[in-house]
């Protein structure tokens, strides 16, 4: 019987890789993690965490207007974005160190260096040693996707990485891509006084989200002075002195915008090149590694999770896939494969937007007979009390079985509220169970209760 250094060697210490290693250690497996950069991956270092720190600061800046309504005079003339940047880096650094602590606590060896797969049981670290493992887990994540004609130089043409590392914001910016990342950057930059032009090639912002929920967000953005261009393609740019002239092609013909920087956020590409897949006979399909129900690849003992497989590119998806893969390696029987209709999506702009499951459009395309309940935020007393009436809670249910098919929340704290309905779906509860559960008054979650009552035909507050 072959002898290995470890039961599991993980390539990549992002939210998928480090969680998988910890779960494996909890189940009695000896694990090591190889990471070429900082532990925590993109999410902790140049993604989820620093962006949410900036979003928090953007909301503080926007709250100055509310204080003005109380007669306070707030002087923002000395506002320094560099300080917000510094706070975002501190948050990232703190959590990255936290990952190192967790690995150490669970007796997981962290090997810093660029790892390459040499065989189904070997990862070679550049300039260092070769680690052997009974199981290998590929968790190398993804990188910003570039588009022809807008190659990143991180000075005038920015990726999300470059934008998060800016210490000074431009006066005018063109953002290409109206998905979650583009919308969040538009929110932050607008709050800090940047003239924002947000361009989306498809017909609506956040193309994968429910149209009715997105419309609430789009109206809010327009009110704030964010220029939206949907159904519009960026065809190129030219330099004009220190400015850039961004050419757009849309339904109404061509248009040219003058901006100082262009941020390209049109998706992410999996990091599956140059990691040694060919050495073990694994072939990626459109950049993604094919896997089974537990993350297992076609090569025995080799698993893959997170952004390198064809599931939603979300940190919480990678973490759950890491747990499933580790449990499978340890001989447990985890629930196979994720239910794609029970994965929450969250957009942390203002108003927030969160969802799971079917949109109306997808439900119709699937031929489902459904009913919906749409409760406006303004019908919840708390939303009026705190001045956050912009928003709605929407529930879709199967007409016959009453199963919750999907939910869409837009408004204050939407990214927290959506989980009540997701838990209900996961526990196979029905809307009537949510509708009849006592909710504290006044709370924003009463809008969730009333949406459930509405879909059952007996809403009280509207």
Image (cartoon, rainbow, N blue to C red):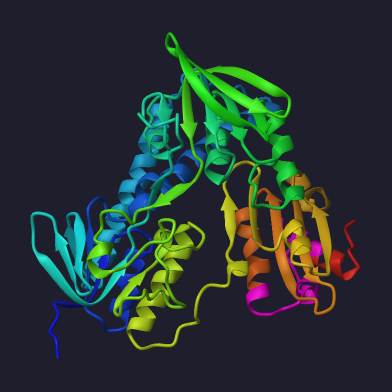
Quadrant of the rendered image containing residue 205: top right
User: At x 67% / y 35%, what residue is drawn?
Assistant: 230
User: At x 25% / y 73%, what residue is drawn?
Assistant: 106
Does the segment drawn in magenta span residue 421? no
Which is nearer the eye, 171 or 135?
135
Which is nearer the eye, 25 or 137?
137
Residue 350 placement (x, y as % from top left): 63, 41
| Extreme residue toward the left, this view | 128
Residue 363 placement (x, y as % from top left): 75, 63
- For the magenta stretch, what is the residue range? 424-451
Tell me the quadrant of the picture where the N terminus can be found: bottom left
| Extreme residue toward the top, this view | 241
Residue 92 placement (x, y as % from top left): 35, 47
User: Compared to 441, does 92 lie above or below?
Assistant: above
Residue 40 placement (x, y as % from top left): 33, 55
Quadrant of the rendered image containing residue 298: bottom left
Does the segment drawn in magenta span residue 435? yes
Quadrant of the rendered image containing residue 175: top right
Can residue 226 be seen here? The reply is no
Number of callouts: 0
User: Compared to 157, does 448 lie above or below?
Assistant: below
User: At x 80% / y 67%, what residue is drawn?
Assistant: 452
């Amino acid at each position: 019987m072959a002898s290995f250094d470890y039961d599991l060697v993980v390539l990549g210490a992002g939210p998928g890789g480090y969680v998988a290693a910890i779960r494996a250690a909890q189940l009695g497996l000896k694990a090591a993690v190889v990471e070429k950069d900082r532990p925590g991956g993109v999410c902790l270092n140049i993604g989820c965490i620093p962006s949410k720190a900036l979003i928090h600061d953007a909301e503080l800046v926007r709250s100055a207007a509310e204080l003005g309504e109380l007669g306070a005079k707030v002087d923002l003339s000395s506002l320094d974005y560099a300080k917000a940047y510094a706070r975002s880096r501190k948050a990232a650094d703190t959590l990255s160190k936290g990952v190192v602590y967790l690995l150490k606590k669970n007796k997981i060896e962290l090997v810093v260096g660029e790892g390459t797969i040499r065989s189904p049981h070997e990862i070679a670290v550049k300039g260092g040693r070769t680690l052997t493992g009974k199981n290998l887990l590929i968790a190398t994540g993804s990188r910003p996707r570039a588009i022809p004609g807008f190659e990143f130089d991180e000075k005038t043409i920015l990726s999300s990485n470059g934008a998060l590392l800016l210490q000074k914001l431009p006066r005018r910016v063109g953002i290409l891509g109206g998905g979650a990342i583009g919308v969040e950057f538009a929110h932050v930059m607008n709050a800090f006084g940047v003239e924002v032009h947000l361009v989306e090639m498809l017909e609506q912002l956040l193309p994968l989200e429910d149209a009715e929920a997105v419309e609430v967000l789009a109206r809010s953005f327009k009110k704030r002075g964010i220029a939206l261009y949907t159904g519009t393609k960026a065809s190129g740019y030219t330099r004009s002195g220190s400015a850039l002239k961004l050419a757009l092609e849309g339904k109404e013909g061509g248009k040219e915008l003058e901006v100082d920087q262009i941020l390209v956020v049109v998706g992410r590409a999996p990091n599956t090149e140059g990691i040694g897949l060919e050495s073990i006979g694994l072939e990626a399909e459109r950049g993604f590694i094919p896997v089974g129900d537990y993350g297992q690849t076609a090569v025995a003992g080799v698993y893959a999770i997170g952004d390198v497989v064809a599931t939603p590119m979300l940190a919480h998806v990678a973490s759950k896939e890491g747990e499933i893969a580790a449990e499978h390696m340890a001989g447990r029987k985890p629930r196979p494969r994720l239910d794609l209709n029970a994965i929450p999506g969250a957009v942390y702009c203002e108003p927030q937007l969160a969802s799971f499951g079917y949109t109306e459009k997808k439900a119709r395309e699937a031929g489902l007979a459904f009913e919906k309940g749409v409760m406006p935020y303004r019908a919840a007393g708390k939303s009026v009390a705190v001045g956050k009436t912009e928003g709605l809670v929407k529930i879709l249910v199967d007409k016959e079985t009453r199963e919750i098919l999907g939910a869409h929340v837009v408004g204050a704290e939407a990214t927290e509220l959506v989980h009540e309905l997701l838990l209900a779906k996961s526990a196979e509860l029905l809307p009537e169970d949510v509708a009849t559960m006592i909710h504290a008054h006044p709370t924003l979650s009463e809008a969730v209760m009333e949406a459930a009552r509405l879909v059952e035909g007996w809403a009280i507050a509207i």
